[in-house]
Amino acid sequence: MSKESIPLSVYDLTVAYHRKPVIWDVQFNIPPGSLVGIVGPNGAGKSTLLKAVMDLIPSASGRVEIFGHPYRDVRHRVGYVPQRESVDWDFPINALDVVAMGLYSKIGWCLPVRKKHRQAALEALRRVGIADLAYRQISQLSGGQQQRTFLARALVQDAELYLMDEPFAAVDAATEQAIVEILQDMKSRGRTSVVIHHDLQTVPDYFDYVVMLNMRVVAHGPVEEVFTNDNLQKTYGGRLTLLDEVSEAMRRQERTL
Amino acid sequence: MSWRDLLLLQDYNTRVVVSSTALLGCAAGLVGTFTLLRKRALMGDALSHATLPGIALAFIIATATGHNGKSLTVLLFGACITGLMGVAVILVLRNSTRLKEDTALGAVLSVFFGAGMALLGVVQQMKGGHAAGLEAFIYGKTASMGFNDAMLISGVAFVCVLVCLLLFKEFKLLCFDEAFAGSRGVPIVLLDLALMALVVMVCIVGLQAVGLILMIALLVIPAAAARFWTQQLSTIVFISAGLGAAGGMTGAAMSAAFANLPSGATIVLVCSLFFLFSMVFGTNRGVLVRFLRRRRMNRSVARQHLLRAIYEVLESSGDFDQRAVSFASLLDKRSWSAKRLSRSIQSAAQDNLLDQTDGQVHLTDEGINEASRLTRQHRLWELYLITYAEIAPSKVDRDADAIEHVLEPEVVLELEALLKASHANVPPSPHALGTES
């Protein structure tokens, strides 16, 4: 398989906050057209991994390739759905405005959002099933509707690789179902989705590939091979206590300097 | 100058000064909206306070080297240097120590301002140092502004307005979702710098008109007032710019009319009046609107309680043909006062849901429909709580009470499907009916 066809390759990626390593030597390849779940306990570095892939936070070492290129060259082929809690939902805009943000790089600097962009945004909202709420203030949307708005903002770009940070967190059953259908639909069109997920029970139903993360990659591969009790035990059971202790000691020393 | 002259802006110089201050207010309203949304509002305060030592130093150096110490360009240049130094010190303090940003901000603001006051004292004792006029930068004094000063202010304010409008969409994205902006390749640091540069420009040229102590008010108050009126950013920006312009204009005009009135104070007071007005009468989040909304909600809750109580009394007597109940039986039904009950009855009577004849309340056709609908909704919700939320039947009434008033039609449909309730009839109550304990 050529490098260009691999949606996401991560080589030896290490990321540290204040010299405390958050992820260590993470390495994996994602097969094209797959639906990938990233699972791991709190603080395992799942969000950090996604952010480091998109150069949103600096990595201490390692390399990320998307379709064989560095992220900044292929940004337009990647869609991102951040965590819902990461923004202030009291912000004075409506759902359509949020979705249109996905088109800003297409619209260009200093130019206003035009009719065709609003139409594309409306179409994306229709795909996630809330076109009727397009002009509703985002503070008036339910949690599930807010999540759908975020999803629509990523869909409107028509990317080939989607990175989603906990899209299923605290959403209603109908929204969960809607998101799953969209993920399936994207898969059938050859798109790749990498989704941070916290509900272990649904992993085998939703995903066909899984990355099990706890500061380092415990296991990755097709769900039926990798998503085993043994690996789950390794991911969730034993924290890397020694690593934790050492990095904590490093941080303490830093504070006294 | 007479009032008539002032109102019609007869005097040419006054006209120029007033319109430049209006443009300044407009720019401050625009820039302020974005800094408020970016949660960096107080940065402008630290910056403007930190300009004072720069002004004094510029005056000292210019006078000592034989230049005109009162030249606005020289003074503002000095202001700019120490203002930016102040911001830089805040950032250094925040990043290199474990001090929080507000602590760093407070420290820098007071230290720079103190240094400025000390330097002003030095200026006062200088030979030939006509320090008079420098205090205009502290409290703001439009009367001291000349034509060229006004032109400088207008020019800079115009540039700020232009940049804000051009970068409107980019600033919106930056303020709303930094991470997403970063993932799309938007240069966040550059945009933040641009926003900060706008704050610097507005603050510096605003020194003369508003004064460095009160400059922050022009950045914060119009933007905060605008949020009471709407939830749409483009409208907020528009209102905020308008309020800032109106405040700047009125304040400058008043200060021109009364020579001893510092224009900064007037501008801020006028802006605060706008703020108070918006806070009370704002159509989106104003105190009055929210009060009315709450009252309407309370009334509709009281109406629902009344109709359900009547229905339940009818149910226990089985007297659905007559559809009449006595006031006394209703009063026993819930813990409500006679006064409140008769008020609810009156308001329901006005809407033709029931009519009242000496101590008897009689439901109309419309009333019985509404009453059975509400009761049904209430019981469906109770059943749901008992079946799915495992709440004891004796407690369920109160829980259902709290929630049923916000049930939307879709939720009721879902309840029906879930509980396999048939469409027409009202299910029996899952708990003993009686007086509310």
Image: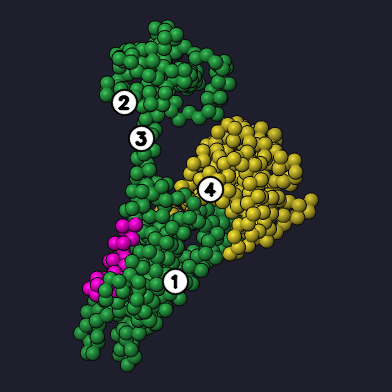
Chain colours: A yellow, B green
Residue A71 in the image: above or below residue B27: above
Task: Identify the residue position indicated by label 1 in the image.
Answer: B157
Magenta residue span: B251-274
Task: Identify the residue position indicated by label 3 in the image.
Answer: B295
Q: Amino acid at mark 1?
A: Ala
Q: Position of residue B276 (x, y in %)?
A: 32, 53
* Residue B263 visible in the current orientation: no
Task: Identify the residue position indicated by label 2 in the image.
Answer: B343
- Residues tagged by mark 1 and mark 3 found on one chain of the structure: yes
Q: What is the chain identity of the residue bearing mark 2?
A: B
Q: Is residue A138 left or right of residue B358?
A: right
Q: What residue is shown at x 23% (from left), y 90% (from top)?
A: B128
Disc nearer the start of the sequence (1/3) = 1
Cα–Cα span, label 4 and label 1: 30 Å
Cα–Cα span, label 2 and label 4: 39 Å
Element type at mark 1: helix
Q: Is residue A51 left or right of residue B7?
A: right
* Residue A155 visible in the current orientation: yes
Q: Position of residue B149 (x, y in %)?
A: 38, 80
Dividing the picture into quadrants, the one containing residue B252 is bottom left
